[in-house]
Every structure is written in structure tokens, then in C-alpha cells.
Image (cartoon, grey):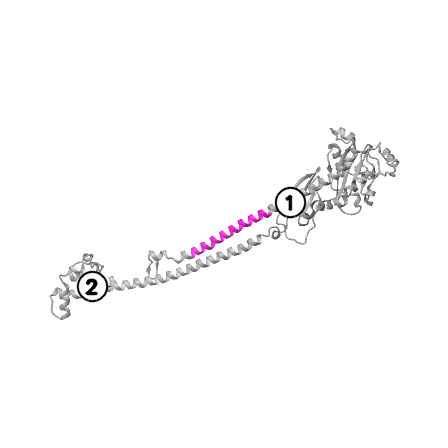
Amino acid sequence: MTDAAGPRSPELAELSPRRGYLLALIVLVGSLVLVFTAWRAARERELRAAEAEFISKSAEVTELLRQGMIKYELVARGGVSMFATVTRERPTPAQWKAYVDGMDIQERFAGMVGLGFAEYVTATRLPEVQLQWRDAGYGMLEVWPRGERADYGPILYLEPKTPANVAAVGFDMYSEPVRRAAMTAAMDTGNTYLSGPVHLIQDGPLQGTGLLLYLPVYRGGSRPATTGLRRAEIQGWAYVPLRVDGFVRNALGAVHGSTRFRVVDEGGEERVLFATPVGSDKRPPAFRHSERFNQYGRRWRVDFESAPLAVAAPRLQGLQNLLALGLFSSLLLYAIAWMLARTEAQAYRIAVRMTEDFRRSEMRFRSAMLYSAIGKALLDSEGQIVEANPALAMIVGLTPEALVGVRFDSLFESDEPEMIAHATGSTPTRRASIVPPVACIARAVSRARRS
């Protein structure tokens, strides 16, 4: 590669300023890649930790819902046990009321409307049951809705005696398909069954989602071994009517306030049983997660939504600050590298200028030596000729190449007399008259080289 002044030396080629700027660019790109890689890894780690915490809390909520229903079942199972402890066909309404009052369900189990008993009655036994009820002094048992059916499941007991519960006595739950499906499944299996979502009789015109938890009651207090025997020995069902809103709040307690979720019944057509209110924050959730579990014969799905990202993973804000600091550091490193590259470029330009000046000086010196009529020689520190001009070669009768390596003082017998004679104005020999200017120039150049 050449420039206007001539070919560039290899040393200067190695000092090309483009390499410095390229290095600065590499520093910038490398530092940015390192910063973004570290920030992304830290961000992913924080997101995974936040999501794991969110899933863990979701599992906790799911377990609380499961345990909450178990508590309701235990209350109903106490009612089933009463049938095994009395000698008559069924406990009296007073005994049933005493048990429910002792449980204090209205205070301890929010969402539980009451604890009731519905008897399984065939069409042929219905008049007999109504007479028994009247003869026991409980009044006339009105079974509704009216109509002839093969089987009935009227409510006989329902405590506490709120006006809504009193109005529900006599309702034939076996006449309604959703209730009938759960009652039949409980009767045939001997297990506790939960109904699908229904509108409770006690709620009247009010909107709300209700559920009914059924436990079969068999004559004799034991569970028959086969389905046929269970149907033959079925006496009725102890059951718990509950409102889903109250049940969820009772089951979750303080956990409910900070959790956004909805409970979906997947049995057949999906129905939303419960959903937390939609807040004013319209930002999308950071995470979503679903938990599925069996709840007494029903398949429930709980869909969870976390808070927005800034709330669900608050430590990400600190990472944003670290990212900004990393970017600033990268730009600072780039600025330093760029300044070094600029300094190198300036040094390069100075070096080029000095090299050109030296080259021109060298060319002038060599031209002066080559074309001079005066004999000139360049000597090393040992006094040997390194280079001689043609004028010197002509004086001593040798070629310039032959003079290289020859000691300068060996060319003359003695230069001191001639120099003395030249200084005193005497007339030396022809050889000596030529030598002094050569010797003086040669010695002067030798001294300059030594210095």
C-alpha cells in the first residue's frame, strides 16, 4: 500500500488506525452482548422464581378448597351417624335441631345454608309418610312440586329454621335432574356426592350459584355391599346446601383477598361456579395456571391469574436498573476504547509525517554524498567503511563496493603529516594533497555516527 509520499513501511502498516476503531467497536458489541445475556439470564431466573411462587400459591388455594368441602362433609356425616344411634326409624326434628345448633354452622361455616335430611319415598309409600308426619304432630307434609312420580326425595329436616329453610321443607329434590343425578350416584355407590351448580330454593329470586352435598343414609346404619342392596336399603340422604361464594370465602380466609381465580365445573357443560371480582387494573396478568381435581364426583378446574408483571415479580425493577447501569458501562468502555483509537490515529499521523521528513532528509543526504566531488565515507564505530561515494573510490583507486569493510586509516600510510603540512601551508606529496579533505570529512562523519 502506498500514499502520496511513497510506500508505507511495515512498521507503519501495523499502526493502522482502523484497527483501533475496529477494536472499539468489538468492545462495544461484546460488552452489550455480555450485559444483555447476563440481564436476560437474571430476568429468566426471577420470572421462574416468581412463577414457581405463583404456582405454589395456586396449589395452596386448591388444597384449601378441597379441605373446605371435607369440613362440610364431616358436618353432614355427623347427621348420618344420628340415624345409627336412635332406635326409631329416624331422629326426631328436635334431635336434629339440637345437633345443628351444637355445630353452630352459621358462625363456623359461612356459605352453609343448613343441614337437612331428605327421605327416599316410593310413590306407594308417599301417603304413609305424610300420615306419619301428621300423626307425629309436625303438621301436614306438602310435597312439591305436585305431580305423580315413581320416586320422591322430599326434604323432611332442614336446620337452622330460617324462613327460607322452613319454606324449603317438602321440596322434592328428586324431581330436579341435577339434584337427582347426585342423589342417585350417592345411593348407588354409598359415597358422598356433590351436585352440579343449581339455584338453591332458599335463594328465591336472588341470583347465586349453589351446590348440594349428599351423603346416603341406609337402614341399619351400615353400607350394603352391592348396588342392588343399596337401592333396597336406602332410607334417604343427609345433605348440605351451600352457596359457592360463601364456601370459597370460608375455605380460603385471608388468602382469597390477593388471589385472582375462577372455579369452573367441568361436568358436562362447563359452568363457572365462582370468580373473583375484576379489579380496576387492566394490565394483563404475568402468569396463568390451572389446577384440576375431583370434588366428590365432580371435576373442578381452578383458573388462576397472577397480578401484572410489575407486582408479581417486583425484583424485576431492580434488574431494569442493573440493565441501565450495564448499558452505561458498555458505552463508557466504548468511549474509552474510541478515545484510545483516536489517540492511536493521531500518533499514526505524526509517525507518518516524521517518517516522511526522515526519508526526505535521508534522500538529501544520500544525494549530497553520491554526487559530491569530495570523497566521503560512512564509518562504523570500529573505523571501518560502511559506505563510500564514487569520489572517494576514484581518489583511492577502488570501487565503492570494494571499500566496504575496509578500515579507513589503512588506505593511507599516515594522515598526520599531510594534515600538519596542510595546516602549516607546506607542500606535501601529490597523494597527501588529496587525502586531507577526504580524511577530514570521513572522520567528521565517523564522529557524528558515534555521537
Along the line of sight, the residue nearer the viewer: 19 or 44: 44
Quarter of the image with the C terminus in it: bottom left
Amino acid type, mark 1: Ser
As helix, strand or loop, the secondary structure at mark 1 comes to: helix
Mark 2 or 1, which is nearer the eye?
A: 1
The residue singled out by tag 2 in the image is 443
Magenta extent:
21-50
Quadrant for the N terminus in the image: bottom left
Q: Specify whether residue 357 is in view.
A: yes
Give the answer, above or below, for where 47 lies relative to 76.
below
Asked if the magenta segment contains residue 23, the reply would be yes
Residue 263 point in image, percent of width and height: 69, 44
Per the model, the C-alpha gap separating discs 2 and 1 is 100 Å
Q: Residue shown at 74%/34% (left/top)?
A: 186
Q: Secondary structure at mark 2?
A: helix
* Towards the viewer: 104 or 124: 104
Q: Is residue 332 magenta?
A: no
Density class for disc 2 (Cα within 10 Å; few <14, some 14-19, many ≥20) is: some
Splitting the image into 4 quarters, where does residue 432 fall? bottom left
Label 1: which residue?
A: 58
Regarding residue 370, the answer to whether it shows in the image is no
Amino acid tagged 2 = Arg
